[in-house]
Image (cartoon, grey):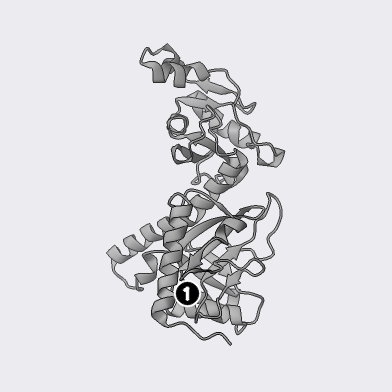
Amino acid sequence: MTALWPAAEQDALRAEAIRWLAARTNDGLDALTSEEIAEFTFGGGSFRLMDPQRGIRKPRQFTAALSIRTTYCPEGAERPYEDDMGPDGLVRYKWRGDDPNHPENRALREAMIHRAPLIWFWGVGQALYKPVFPVYLIAEEEAQQQFVVATDGLQHLQQTTSPMEEVLRRYLRQETYRRLHQPVFRSMIMRAYESSCAVCQLRHSPLLDAAHIVEDRHERGIASVRNGLALCKIHHAAYDVGILGLTPELRVEVRADILDEVDGPLLEHGIKKLHGQPLMVVPRRRADRPDPELLQIHYERFRAS
């Protein structure tokens, strides 16, 4: 029987795992394959950060869970466990089965009680995961058989009637959404567009963004591959402010007044020469290509600007 590690050693492994993942993912920008995740070592030996078969990883040496995993789900398919957002804007992670005393559910409960930092491996492709870290379990909803997940900061806030505390809570909820959903959305988009700008083919990952076709505050602005484009930072900004538009037929248009403007080589070659050109990078899978209806919504606003 494997002995439990001292609490300090468990904490040291969690901290080292988070540092290692930050370095391997370009500070959270990139996804990792299962094989890459398996390369983690601690104390001179290999140590599994993710359970390849189960959603919850609780090492025998630990008192609480180390990581959770969400299975990759192609567009239109259903996951066996549907982790979802609650009415408070925070994400939920489902129990293993329906037994509250299942060892894996107890391991999650221990992580919640002790506010232990977890790693969430979110599937964004076959054997491809976006690690989100650290995340915390801040509450349990037994009736719904799930835990409430937050990112760093919100786990320390207590329920109070202070208006300032409520402002901070709302901000941290928004941060939780951004830090949990945006990295996963980015990884799905980069995978679909092979880490290239759809407009100019730039392939430097730190200079690429996952852009929403229709912004997420719009009723149809979900974080879906079909509502996304891989764009370099210049073309993302140009798209968002209406300098550059995209037709439902995937052709680039440049606003008329910009076409008439005389400026330096970046505007001339990086913006104006794109007018009328087709996208240079389109996802191979039809299911990953931009939704024409969403493109039409944005294109109509571009034409009206």
> Quarter holding the N terminus?
bottom right
Asked if 57 appears above or below 231 in the picture, the reply is below
Q: Observer-nearest residue: 102 or 45?
A: 45
At x 56%, y 76%, the residue is 58
**From the viewer's perspective, is 19 left or right of 140?**
left
Q: Tag 1, which secondary structure? A: strand
Residue 142 in picture, x, y percent from top left? 56, 78
**From the viewer's perspective, is 148 left or right of 279?**
left
Q: Observer-nearest residue: 164 or 264?
A: 264
Asked if 105 appears above or below 50 in the picture, the reply is below
> Quarter holding the C terminus?
top left
Asked if 166 appears above or below 226 in the picture, the reply is below
Residue 299 in picture, x, y percent from top left? 55, 28
Q: Which residue is mark 1?
A: 139
Which amino acid type is shown beneath numbered disc 1?
A: Ala
Residue 175 in picture, x, y percent from top left? 41, 56
**From the viewer's perspective, is 181 left or right of 194?**
left
Number of residues whose C-alpha sits closer than 10 Å to that of mark 1, classed few (under 14), some (14–19) or many (20 or more): some
At x 46%, y 71%, the residue is 43
At x 56%, y 85%, the residue is 2
Residue 154 in picture, x, y percent from top left? 38, 66
